[in-house]
Each structure stands twice: as C-alpha cells, then as structure tokens.
C-alpha cells in the first residue's frame, strides 16, 4: 500500500498521541514498569476473533478507540485516582502506537481490513 495524503496524516496523529501520552505519563511520575507491563494489554481484545470476524472486530475496536481511554482518564481525573489516569495514558499510548505503525480500527470483513487501509 502506498503511504500518502491522509495515511501520512493519520500516522502522524498516532505519533502525536503516542508522544503526548508518554509525556503526560512521565510528568505524572507513574512507574515505568507498569507502562512496560501493560502496554500490550489492549491487544488481548483480539481473542474476540475466536468468535468470528464481526465479533472480533467489535472486541478489537472497543479496546482500540480513544473514546474509552479518554473516558477512563476523565473518571480518574474527576475522582482523583492516579492509577486510573496512568492506565488510561498507557491505553491511549498503545492506540497511538498502533495508528503510527498502520493498525487501525477493524471492519467486520476481516482482521486485515482497517480504517487505515488493508494491513
């Protein structure tokens, strides 16, 4: 697949999200061991593909949308729960990394069909 136009912008968005969340994590003084241990946790949503491509895409997308990570961060911020804030930042960093390397939200037609193009 040729990388140009919107694809470049979408990947730059992923880089920006990854950079911003890592900086926020660092400025929060959260432990880096937690970051390293949990960074790939959202990929466990791929187990949904054991139930078929449509269910798999729904599971995967639920774990790879900024909306859910941001909602968790807001909950942690409003409730003064630093642990929730750190988990949300790790989650959002993972999503940003995925977008940077070309993994997008999935379509029900198959794992390789994403909003960023076919992987």
Image (cartoon, rainbow, N blue to C red):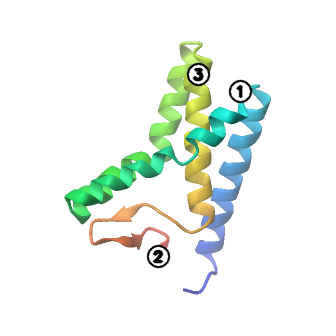
Dot 3 lies on which element?
Answer: helix
Where residue 111 appears, x then y in whole percent? Answer: 36, 69
Left-right relation of 114 to 108: right
Q: Disc 1 to disc 3, how far (Cα)?
A: 8 Å
Residue topped by disc 3: 83
Residue displayed at 70% across by 53% down:
16
Sequence-wise, which precedes: disc 1 or disc 2? 1
On screen, 52 above or below 30? below
Sequence-wise, which precedes: disc 2 or disc 3? 3
Between residue 22 and residue 3, name the one nearer to us: 22
On screen, 114 above or below 15? below
Q: Could you say which quadrant of the image residue 38 lies in? A: top right
Between residue 28 and residue 9, name the one nearer to us: 28
Residue displayed at 53% across by 36% down:
70
Q: Residue furthest left?
A: 51
Marks 1/3 in contact by CB < 8 Å: the verdict is no
Query: Which class describes the residues within 10 Å of circle 2: few (<14), some (14-19), or many (20+)?
Result: some
Q: Disc 2 to disc 3, how far (Cα)?
A: 35 Å
Residue topped by disc 1: 30
Residue topped by disc 2: 117
Q: Could you say which quadrant of the image residue 34 lies in? A: top right
Dot 2 lies on which element?
Answer: strand
Tell us which disc is closer to us: 1 or 2.
1
Query: Which class describes the residues within 10 Å of circle 3: few (<14), some (14-19), or many (20+)?
Result: few
């Amino acid at each position: 697949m040729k990388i140009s136009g919107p694809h470049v912008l979408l990947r730059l968005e992923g880089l920006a999200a990854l950079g911003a969340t890592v900086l926020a994590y660092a400025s929060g003084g959260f432990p880096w061991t937690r970051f390293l241990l949990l960074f790939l946790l959202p990929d466990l949503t791929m187990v949904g593909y054991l139930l078929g491509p449509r269910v798999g895409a729904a599971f995967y997308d639920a774990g790879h949308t900024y909306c859910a990570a941001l909602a968790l961060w807001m909950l942690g911020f409003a409730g003064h729960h630093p642990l929730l804030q750190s988990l949300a930042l790790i989650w959002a960093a993972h999503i940003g990394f995925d977008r940077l390397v070309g993994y997008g939200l999935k379509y029900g037609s198959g794992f390789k069909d994403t909003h960023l193009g076919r992987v």
